[in-house]
């Protein structure tokens, strides 16, 4: 049975949470929302998210699922909630064949906008979680170059003009994959939550990728080894100041019952950035202009 949203769960509220602080979500584009239906419980479902996005006048929301494409779901949601700016994509985990260009092509033809490289199924993620005997999906060949499968994926992403996100690849893999993607015609690249312990990318590596034209995603929180979620606010602020506003994308990565319900958590995140000293113009760049350009809305 597929778990639906647990709307009875208010979500964990971190110490940074203040009920009186919220930011206007008009025009905000969130490239990273985990909504139901999913194989794990989520705090909001697709239709509720669509209505909320429409009510707040958001510029776009991308539904992400680690195991199944979401382009077709998003299309149905747009029919059910006319005017809702809901989009989908595909994560190249083993459940869709890993680095499968045919799956990317099908997703694109169904209206998908975003392709994530492997996340839970990534070799780097699997090594971090130390699953006995598991190898995961790697991006590089024995010579440390982009594998043929990865090259084929990039060619399809480029042909359809999709946004490429790096998933849970290792920093070493990402430093090879990003320039290879650009060389093969991919025009838009987003480094997925580089502060997450499953990625753990240095500011220097992030700056190098930004200099090549990639953007860096900063999300609300991340899970620790014990499953407890910790807000990334202060860590993200340091990274933004080190790497730059111009290459930053603010996204929520919300939907877990343990975290504040979307879009309240996203609004709170933006308000925290304001209290941390980021200007309205800088926040606008990070949560509206940059993600809108990447999504093509």
Image: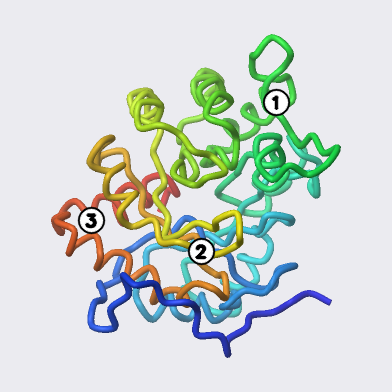
Report, in whole angstroms, how far the alpha carbon at label 3 lies from the one at label 2.
Answer: 24 Å
Residue at 51% x, 76% y is 49
In the rendering, at what x and y percent does residue 5 appear? 64, 80
Residue at 38% x, 81% y is 55
- At label 2, counting other C-alpha atoms closer than 10 Å, the crowd grade (few under 14, some 14-19, many 20 or more) is some
Asked which colour scheme the image uses, the reply is rainbow
In the rendering, at what x and y percent does residue 274 appear? 19, 62
In the rendering, at what x and y percent does residue 10 appear? 50, 85
Residue 152 is labelled as 1
Residue farthest toward the front in the current orientation of the protein: 226
Check disc 2 and report the residue beneath it.
229
Report, in whole angstroms, how far the alpha carbon at label 1 lies from the one at label 2.
Answer: 36 Å
Q: Nearer the viewer, mark 3 or mark 2?
A: 2
Lateral position of residue 243 relative to residue 107, left or right: left
Q: Quadrant of residue 149?
A: top right
Check disc 3 and report the residue beneath it.
283
Cβ atoms under marks 1 and 2 closer than 8 Å: no
Image quadrant occupied by the C terminus: bottom left
Q: Nearer the viewer, mark 3 or mark 1?
A: 3
Residue at 14% x, 56% y is 277
How many numbered circles does the render carry? 3
């Amino acid at each position: 049975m597929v778990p639906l949203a647990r709307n009875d769960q208010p979500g964990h509220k971190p110490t940074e949470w203040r009920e009186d602080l919220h930011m206007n979500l008009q025009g905000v584009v969130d490239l990273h929302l985990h909504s139901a239906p999913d194989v794990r419980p989520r705090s909001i479902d697709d239709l509720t998210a669509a209505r909320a996005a429409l009510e707040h006048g958001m510029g776009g929301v991308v539904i992400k699922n680690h195991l199944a494409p979401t382009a077709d779901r998003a299309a149905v949601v747009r029919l059910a909630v006319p005017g809702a700016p809901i989009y989908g994509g595909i994560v190249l985990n083993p459940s869709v064949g890993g680095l499968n260009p045919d799956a990317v092509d099908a997703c694109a033809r169904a209206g998908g906008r975003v392709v994530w490289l492997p996340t839970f199924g990534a070799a780097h993620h699997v090594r971090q979680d130390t699953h006995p005997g598991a190898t995961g999906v790697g991006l590089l060949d024995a010579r440390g170059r982009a594998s043929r499968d990865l090259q084929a994926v990039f060619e399809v992403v480029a042909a359809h003009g999709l946004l490429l996100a790096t998933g849970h690849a290792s920093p070493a893999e990402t430093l090879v994959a990003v320039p290879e993607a650009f060389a093969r015609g991919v025009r838009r690249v987003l480094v997925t939550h580089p502060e997450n312990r499953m990625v753990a990318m240095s500011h220097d590596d992030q700056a190098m990728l930004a200099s090549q034209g990639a953007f860096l995603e900063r999300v609300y929180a991340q899970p620790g080894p014990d499953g407890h979620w910790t807000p990334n606010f202060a860590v993200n602020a340091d990274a933004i100041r080190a790497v730059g506003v111009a290459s930053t994308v603010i996204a929520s990565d919300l939907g877990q019952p343990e975290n504040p319900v979307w879009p309240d958590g996203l609004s709170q995140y933006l308000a925290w950035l304001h209290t941390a000293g980021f200007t309205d113009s800088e926040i606008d760049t990070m949560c509206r202009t940059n993600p809108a350009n990447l999504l093509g809305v």
